[in-house]
Image (cartoon, helix red, strand yellow):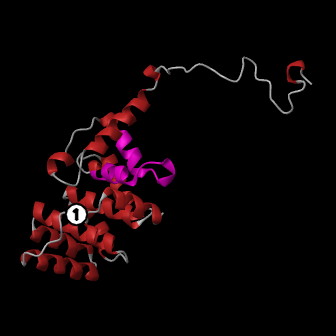
Amino acid sequence: MDENSKGKGNVINIPGGPYRPSTIIDRQGLANVEIRERVTKKLQIHDFDSSEKDRSMNFSEEEYQVVRLIATEGVSSGNEPAIRYKAITALAARPSVENFNTISDLARFGEDFYIRGYAMMALGHTALYAHLPILLVGLKSEERFERSAAARAIENIIRRTSAAGVRAHVKAIGDREGEEMFQKILDQLEQGVSRPSEPRKTESNITFTAAKNR
């Protein structure tokens, strides 16, 4: 037995003592940490669902790499679900292969209907016909939130392009059920019946419900 630990029961002898003065870490070599903190702060203070102005807020390409990472991180990362949803929406503002592939993947393969729904709304913000096949699948979801998100996304594409254009692409897909659902959306728009700007929830409800469904 060590001389310093005699008569001290199970006390462990720690060289230098059990206490250390606090040390300030030099963050100069931690550029990725600083970028992530900056991106997270931007996502926290902006409501990307509220206006085109906020949706198009500029991120640098370096920052968009982090936005994509946050958008794909699951609950194990410890991120607030609301921050992840904002990251997904923010990706639609920058036309790039990486951004659009990320939200397309999330719309198809996201781990729960909230993730898939928010990704579908992001696809709607792009106003691209190419995303219609994914949105038609979303219209058939068993989950109301996901169906509503897909319908809202299609409405947005119609408004930003044309009903005739969207109809032609939907018809070309060859999905009769999807075509009928699209016609119902179009009928509602022509009658002046529209959904709220987004299937909105408070951030506290988003956090609770998303956690419960994972």
Towards the viewer: 186 or 144: 144
Residue 195 vertical placement versus 20 (above, below): below
Question: Of 44 and 186, which appears nearest the observer?
Answer: 44
Q: Secondary structure at mark 1?
A: loop
Horizontal placement of 163 versus 65: left or right?
left
Q: Nearer the viewer, residue 39 or 25?
A: 25
Q: Determine which residue is flagged by label 1.
A: 198
Image height check: is 159 above or below 192? above
Q: Position of residue 26 (x, y in %)?
A: 48, 19
Q: Nearer the viewer, residue 121 or 182?
A: 121
Q: Position of residue 116 (x, y in %)?
A: 36, 63
Kindly report the secondary structure that dominates the magenta region of the rendered protein.
Answer: helix
Query: Furthest residue to the right?
Result: 1
Q: Is residue 77 magenta?
A: yes
- Point 23% across, 50% down: residue: 48
Q: Residue at x 32, y 75 (%)?
A: 144
Work out which residue is located at the far top of the displayed protein and give it: 16
> Label 1 is placed on what type of residue?
Glu
Give the residue furthest to the left.
191
Q: Give the percent coordinates (x, y) of residue 100.
A: 30, 52
Where in the figure is residue 171, as x and y percent of width and height?
20, 76
Q: Quadrant of residue 19?
A: top right
Taking the magenta stretch, the answer to whether it contains residue 159 is no
Judge whether residue 110 can be spotted in this image.
no
Residue 75 falls left or right of residue 9: left
Range drawn in magenta: 65-89
Which residue: 80% across, 24% down? 13
- Relative to 69, say whether 121 is above or below: below
